[in-house]
Image (tube, rainbow, N blue to C red):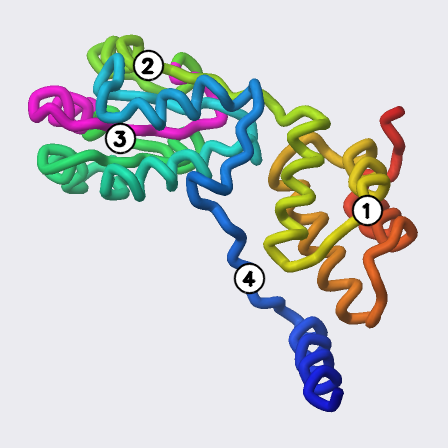
């Protein structure tokens, strides 16, 4: 009994630190929740190395699951991370094996270097996976040859998560923390939250921390407090 109390005290002490330790959620292939909106993207990831083109782009909003899929592919393919900036050796890395370039529209790139990366991938029989919030036609590519290469890439769009997927994700995120929650509470959260996987993770993390700091269970009133704090208090009924 004493050990249980001490463990609980340690958990509360951690919760009360100004910066919480990051939680390692299960993010492997077997942990992926596949819905209709993800089916095409999952299929292309699973199909590697038999891709329809050497360059594949996953496009979708923040929190749509692009990074999860990219990491699954990277683990399977052994792809190296690249950032095609001016003066980088990204094209040389691309000549030796699969490469991954994430958050293209946010990180940015040098037109000439990205063009050389794509050429290197094509010439050496390798693969390039890129992720972006925007379709490549909206990228600030000025080099005509680069735009031509991007048009030849396979683009797979990932839509915003629906209610069913968000419910599954929230249950999974709580399970990753060894927490069980009532289905009605999950539905309450889903009906009032922003439609993104990032929002789901933020809400679960905040609920877990708040419940630990107060020594209470995760209840509807606690969920309402967190949702209101995050600006998601209006119900979507």
Image-quadrant location for residue 17: bottom right
Residue found 27% across the figure and 26% down from its top: 48
Whether 213 is drawn above or below 85: the answer is: below
The mark nearer the N terminus, 2 or 4, is 4
Whether residue 49 is visible, yes or no, is yes
Marks 2 and 3: which is nearer the front?
Answer: 2
Q: Secondary structure at mark 1?
A: loop
Residue 154's tag is 2
Marks 4 and 3: which is nearer the front?
Answer: 4
Gap between marks 2 and 4 measured at Cα: 34 Å
- State the image coordinates of residue 66 (x, y, percent, origin top left): 46, 32
Q: Please say whether residue 16 is one of the residues in the magenta stretch.
A: no
Residue 182's tag is 1
Whether 184 is drawn above or below 155: the answer is: below
Gap between marks 1 and 2 measured at Cα: 41 Å
Question: Which sits in the foreground, 43 or 193?
Answer: 43
Q: Which residues are magenta?
A: 115-136
Q: Secondary structure at mark 4?
A: loop
Image-quadrant location for residue 78: top left
Q: Which residue is tagged 4?
A: 22
């Amino acid at each position: 009994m004493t050990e249980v109390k001490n463990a609980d005290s340690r958990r509360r002490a951690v919760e009360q630190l100004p910066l919480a330790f990051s939680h390692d959620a299960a993010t492997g292939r077997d942990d992926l929740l596949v819905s209709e909106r993800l089916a095409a993207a999952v299929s292309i990831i699973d199909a590697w190395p038999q891709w329809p083109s050497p360059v594949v782009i996953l496009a979708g909003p923040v929190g749509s699951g692009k990074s999860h899929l990219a990491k699954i592919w990277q683990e399977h393919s052994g792809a190296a991370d690249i950032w095609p900036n001016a003066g980088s050796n990204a094209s040389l890395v691309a000549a030796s094996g699969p490469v991954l370039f994430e958050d293209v529209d946010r990180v940015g790139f040098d037109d000439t270097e990205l063009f050389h990366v794509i050429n290197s991938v094509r010439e050496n029989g390798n693969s390039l996976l890129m992720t972006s919030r925007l379709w490549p036609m909206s990228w600030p590519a000025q080099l005509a040859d680069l735009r031509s290469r991007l048009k030849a890439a396979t683009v797979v769009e990932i839509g915003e998560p629906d209610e069913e997927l968000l419910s599954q994700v929230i249950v999974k995120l709580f399970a990753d923390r060894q927490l069980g929650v009532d289905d009605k509470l999950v539905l309450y959260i889903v009906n009032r939250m922003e439609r993104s996987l990032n929002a789901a993770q933020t809400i679960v993390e905040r609920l877990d921390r708040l419940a630990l700091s107060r020594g209470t269970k995760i209840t509807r009133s606690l969920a309402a407090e967190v949702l209101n704090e995050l600006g998601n208090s209006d119900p979507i009924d």
